Amino acid sequence: MNHKEVAEQLVPLLGGKENIVSATHCATRLRLVMDDESKIDKSAVEELDGVKGAFSSSGQYQVIFGTGTVNKVFAHFGPLVGASMGEEEEKKDASVSHKDAAKSKMNPFARFARTLSNIFVPIIPAIVAAGMLMGLLGLMRTYEWMDPASGLFVMLDMFSSASFIILPILIGFSAAREFGGNTYLGAVIGGIMTHPALLNPWGLSDAQPETLDFFGFGVEMLGYQGTVIPVLLTVYVMSWLEKNFRKIVPNAVDLLLTPFLTVIFTGFVALLVVGPLGRALGNGLTTALDVVYETAGPIAGLIFGGLYSTIVLTGVHHSFHAIEAELLNNVGGNYLLPIWAMANIAQGGATLAVFFKTRNKKTKEIALPAAISAFLGITEPAIFGVNLKHRRPFIGAAIGGALGGAYVVFTKVMANGIGLTGIPMFAIAQDPINYGIGCLIAVGGAVIATLLLGWKEEAK
């Protein structure tokens, strides 16, 4: 394809340069905030060479080109709409303004979900690395490949637990950036909540913390290693305090007084009020999920696996990272991710069925790479480029996801991390064999359901 030509054709189909408020791109899609989406010639956009689908979600109109193509199109598209930046700092500023523009188009619940996503997505690589190490250690222990008392095993164990021990520091840094606070003060607050003076509950089940007498109030000296909700709430309070201190502290002493006051007040709030409250909320959430998981069992997997792709359409799935991270700390594994993985890989199965049956050349060109992308955990090309467009394949994928979800819950498959689905999730799956069987059930169920349901073939 001629990337420059496609970019030039795309601008007028989107309603012209003046209709594009801001533009950026991710690994697979152009992400555009539009002034008026009714001006977009959507059918013509989808017919452009290289376009694998287009959809509106999370306050943005998104055009799917696929990995390795979208950046080449954007290199020509950006200058045409005034979104091309030369320096890294300018790119950062453009990205921030694009996020603000996109959020302004969202409803409050979607904005909340997007905020959580912005906080946790940058942290995912650290949790994935720790999860893979945990999986490796589990294999070493199970098959006795190595003595657990050996120096190598002990060091690997340290490496695997480090991300969860300092998780509040990572979240503190990322959350402060999202909430508009000083990122390093956010990390300091995370450090306070994981201070060595506080008992580290990570990996301990029956240890009893000391109680500190603070002006007649008993403060439980229990740390927040591995927790999520307490540090999120605390850093939100910290960012609010910092902004308000800056309004009243004279500029001449702002650099000295504002961080000083912010750390002191937030530290007290963290240990006396917000931290214990957040811990209670986190424990309550995981307890409720455990009750559903243990009581409903495969039925819960059937429902969640079948509905997950529909939830993706709303953007609410971005908020699940926080819940999954809380499960990793409180339960010792993430039993939600395998369910989401079944739904994602089923989308690939449905798209594969479309590829084999369709006679439409454009659909064939999109379907095969979209199916491969879904098997690797990136489902947007499959969902929006093929399955949802033809409707019934999307239902077929939901059926496959439901069947696979029921199986992984029945066999109690868990993951050691968050973020990875599809084939890459084998690296963090605690039970790779049953996870693999679940994948086959999801793909097979989706293919069969899609072929049985059929769909109306396009004329061109």
Image (tube, rainbow, N blue to C red):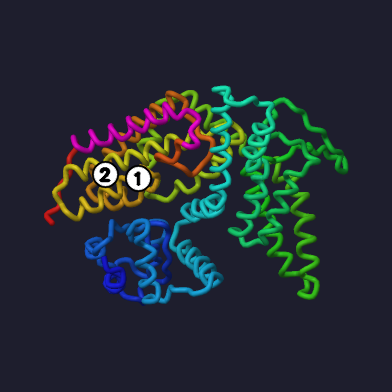
Q: In terms of depth relative to the viewer, which is nearer, 292 or 223?
A: 223
Evaluate whether residue 222 shows in this view. yes
Q: Earlier in the sequence, mark 2 or mark 1?
A: 2
How many marks are shown on the rendered structure?
A: 2
> Is 132 placed above or below 290 here?
below
Residue range corresponding to the magenta coloring? 427-452
Evaluate whether residue 14 shows in this view. no
Query: Amino acid type of disc 1?
Result: Ala
Q: Residue furthest left?
A: 459
Residue 16 position within the rendered picture, expressed as x and y whole percent measured from the top left: 31, 75
Residue 180 position within the rendered picture, expressed as x and y whole percent measured from the top left: 62, 62
Residue 184 position within the rendered picture, expressed as x and y whole percent measured from the top left: 69, 58
> Is 144 placed above or below 239 here?
above
Categorize mark 2 by other alpha carbons within 10 Å: few (<14), some (14-19), many (20+): many
**Residue underneath mark 2:** 351
Query: Amino acid type of disc 2?
Result: Thr
SS label for mark 2: helix
**Is residue 32 shown in magenta?**
no
> Is 160 placed above or below 86 here?
above
Q: Are marks 2 and 1 in contact (CB under 8 Å)?
A: yes
Per the model, the C-alpha gap separating discs 2 and 1 is: 9 Å
**Residue underneath mark 1:** 374
> Is 138 placed above or below 450 here?
above
